Image: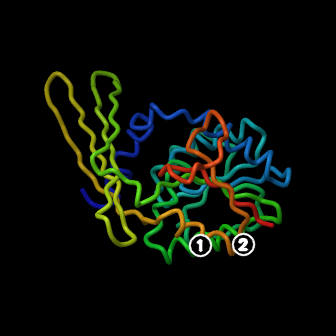
Amino acid sequence: MSANALYTDLSGYYDLMCVDIDYQAQSHCIRRLHQIFGNGGNRHLDLACGTGPHLRHFIDFGYQSRGLDINQPMLDIAATRCPEAQFIRQDMSSFAVDEPLDLITCFLYSIHYNAGISTLQQCISRVYHALKQGGIFCFNAVAKDKINNALFVKHSARQADDLFSFRSSWFYSGEGDMQSLKLSIEKSNATETQIWHDEHPMVAFSFADLLALLQPYFEVHMFEHDYDKLIPWDQQSGNVIVTCVKV
């Protein structure tokens, strides 16, 4: 399949692929971080919003939310889920807003969809200029030097007469600033089995690299990748939740 075929042609299966994700817990955690570090405002943008499940929770929390994604089929589903929201089809590295924001989020490691370190730097600059003073930017990230290529996650879900098996894993070659997210879907029923494989190129960085990009713009706080309780990053684990405050 081509680079974005899985997300374009199979966007209708995306929610099924992510059925094991606790969107409510993730959204609530970032709301808590916004309450702790933010400016008290409620203007919110979700970068790489996909089909909008996080947006749904932020709207229900009382935010004036909008979503941004590069994929129109995803945005079409999100608009059905969140008719109150505005949606923008733009790249996160080159987006612009008409009014400054209080909170920008980017869930599910989507910050890595920037095409390289220079593109990531452009994205960070865009976020900075889109935020009000005291606004915050929250996202999760994985460190390239902590990736274990042998690890993967897998789950199954049923839709009507079809059984779906989803598998995903990170891969990093050990050098350079690109890694990949490997994905596969198996769809089976009583008469046939179909299998799709896809691999998404994503920007790779160490957390030292990431801090070097963020600190000229933001006050940066890093937490363990645990959406149920806020624990400062132990500087050893390879998954973090990052909160950036525009001061």
Q: Residue at x 56, y 74 (%)?
A: 121
In the rendered image, the residue lying farthest to the left is 191
Which amino acid is tagged 1? Leu
Label 2 vs label 1: CA separation? 15 Å
| Residue 122, placed above or below residue 183 | below
The picture quadrant where one finds residue 190 is: top left
| Residue 125, placed above or below residue 240 | below
Where is residue 205 shown, x and y percent of the image? 46, 66
Residue placed under numbered mark 1 in the picture: 213
In the rendered image, the residue lying farthest to the bottom is 118
Where is residue 5 shown, x and y percent of the image? 31, 55
Tell which of 84 and 37 is nearer to you.
37
* Secondary-structure class at tag 2: helix
Q: Residue at x 57, y 36 (%)?
A: 23
In which quadrant of the rendered image does the C terminus lie? bottom right
Q: Residue at x 28, y 21 (%)?
A: 161
The picture quadrant where one finds residue 167 is: top left
Q: Which mark is residue 129?
A: 2
Way the structure is coloured:
rainbow
In the rendered image, the residue lying farthest to the right is 40
